[in-house]
Image (spheres, rainbow, N blue to C red):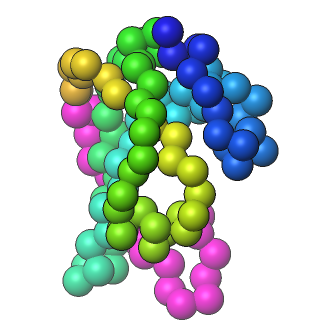
Amino acid sequence: MAARAPTPISSAECWPNYREFLAYSVPQDRALSPVPARRLTSRQEIELGIPLDGCEPLTGSVVSRAARAIAGDAVPLCFRVPAVGFRFEGEHLDDAPRAGEALR
């Protein structure tokens, strides 16, 4: 069961246990895509409806140059969902901030 999965030490600073990590990560309902040519960011609103108990922890080593470039030597915290019913809710376009502007 996902709630009993180990939480790497570095992740414990953010989430007290694996279930709390899932509760934060799984309900994410938005994907972002930059559109530099139009100075926009596209927000795709999505609904995945993944139950936390449906998440299976993954263990073992992860080798990824892309992940290392972003997260350095951080220990990966991964899970698998056997099946997902994806529902697209809509798309919204946001103006890209100009250099030095705060995100809204």
Residue segment shown in magenta: 88-104
Task: List the single residue furthest toward the front.
Answer: 60
- Relative to 45, say whether 21 is above or below: above
For residue 8, which quarter of the picture?
A: top right
Tally of numbered tags: 0
Identify the residue at horizontal 26%, vertical 39% (top origin).
90
Q: Is residue 90 magenta?
A: yes
Asked if residue 56 is positioned above or below residue 71 in the image, the reply reads: above
Q: Indicate yes or no whether the magenta region holds residue 48.
A: no
Question: As drawn, is 13 to the left or to the right of 57?
Answer: right
Q: Residue furthest bottom?
A: 99
Residue 70, image x, y percentages: 49, 68
Q: Which one is in front, 44 or 27?
A: 27
Q: Where, by quadrant of the figure, is residue 11 drawn? A: top right
Name the spot of residue 38 as percent of width and height, x first: 25, 79
In this rendered view, identify the residue nearer to me: 62 or 18.
62
Q: At x 22% / y 33%, what residue is drawn?
A: 88
Give the residue at x 22% y 18%.
83
Left or right of 45, for residue 51: right
Left or right: residue 15 compared with residue 98: right
**Residue name at image x 61 percent, y 88 percent:** 100
Q: In which quadrant is the C terminus drawn?
A: bottom right
Of the pair 90 and 7, the residue shown nearer to us: 7
Q: Position of residue 47 (x, y in %)?
A: 33, 27
User: Measured along the vertical axis of the image, is residue 41 above or below residue 19?
Assistant: below
Whole-percent x and y of residue 19?
A: 61, 20
Residue 82 seen in render: yes
Image-quadrant location for residue 94: bottom left
Residue 23 visible here: no
